[in-house]
Image (cartoon, rainbow, N blue to C red):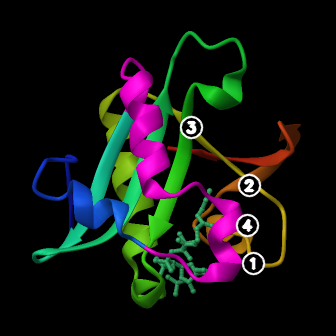
Amino acid sequence: MRLELVTKENVRAACDLKLHPHQESYVAPVAVSIAEAYVNQDIAWLRVIMDEDQVVGFVMVAIQPDEPIEAYRFCIWRLNIAAEEQGKGYGRFAIDSVLKEARERGVSRVTVTWHPGEDGPEEFYKRLGFVPTGEVLEGEKVGAIDV
Ligand SMILES: CC(C)(COP(=O)(O)OP(=O)(O)OC[C@H]1O[C@@H](n2cnc3c(N)ncnc32)[C@H](O)[C@@H]1OP(=O)(O)O)[C@@H](O)C(=O)NCCC(=O)NCCS
């Protein structure tokens, strides 16, 4: 498993990643995330998750240390693992890699926001050690972890 930059070689496979239909309301399609990253290049950190030569997922983080809302300073923005590749540790690997990136930048707290709901990622993030802060921002719950 490894992370790679989004390149002209992998961008189509990244955009073709499909979730389970019941998960689609919880995260934007990868193509939308890449478009948002294009117009937010100053804050977007994005990678594809690879296993050998296969794109299995996508992760994007917003990094904006001067943001007044603390929860948005180093915040996991998107995480998509292909439906058929879920449950194999790729999500954990992606988040561990993000936490490592945070440490290397001297960031001590990483946050994530998620839509609450039965098919949402709340239990996944709790399993990885994120703790709900009690905040709700733009309808999404905030979770945080000290790194
Ligand atoms: C949530 C998501 C990213 C998890 O990715 P994944 O690769 O399937 O997760 P992993 O296999 O790395 O699982 C890591 C751990 O979390 C647990 N876990 C994963 N999903 C879980 C869930 N829905 N409920 C409870 N535990 C869960 C696993 O059992 C595993 O535990 P373990 O390592 O202690 O055995 C993936 O299901 C997904 O892409 N969902 C749809 C999009 C989404 O909601 N993204 C988040 C937007 S903020």
Residue 106 % position (x, y): 38, 26
Q: Secondary structure at mark 4?
A: helix
Quadrant position of residue 115: bottom right
Which quadrant of the render holds ligand 1?
A: bottom right
Under 8 Å from ligand 1: the CB of mark 4?
yes
Q: Which residue is mark 2?
A: 131
Counting other residues with Cα less than 10 Å from the Cα at mark 3, is it few (<14), some (14-19), or many (20 or more)? many
Under 8 Å from ligand 1: the CB of mark 1?
yes
Instruction: Give the mark, 2 or 3, whose residue is nearer the N terminus.
Output: 3
Q: Which residue is mark 1?
A: 119
Type of amino acid at the residue the image marks with label 4: Glu
Which of the two discs, 3 and 1, sits closer to the camera? 1
What residue lies at 46% left-to-right and 75% top-to-bottom? 18
Instruction: Give the mark, 2 or 1, whose residue is nearer the N terminus.
Output: 1
Gap between marks 3 and 1 measured at Cα: 21 Å
Type of amino acid at the residue the image marks with label 3: Cys
In this rendering, does residue 78 appear at all?
Answer: yes
> In this view of the protein, which residue sits in the foreground, 60 or 7?
7
User: Start and end of the magenta stretch?
Assistant: 18-44
Which of the two discs, 2 and 1, sits closer to the camera? 1
Residue 126 % position (x, y): 69, 66
What residue lies at 44% left-to-right and 55% top-to-bottom? 30
Gap between marks 4 and 2 measured at Cα: 10 Å
Q: Which residue is mark 4?
A: 122
Which of the two discs, 1 and 4, sits closer to the camera? 1
Q: Secondary structure at mark 3?
A: strand
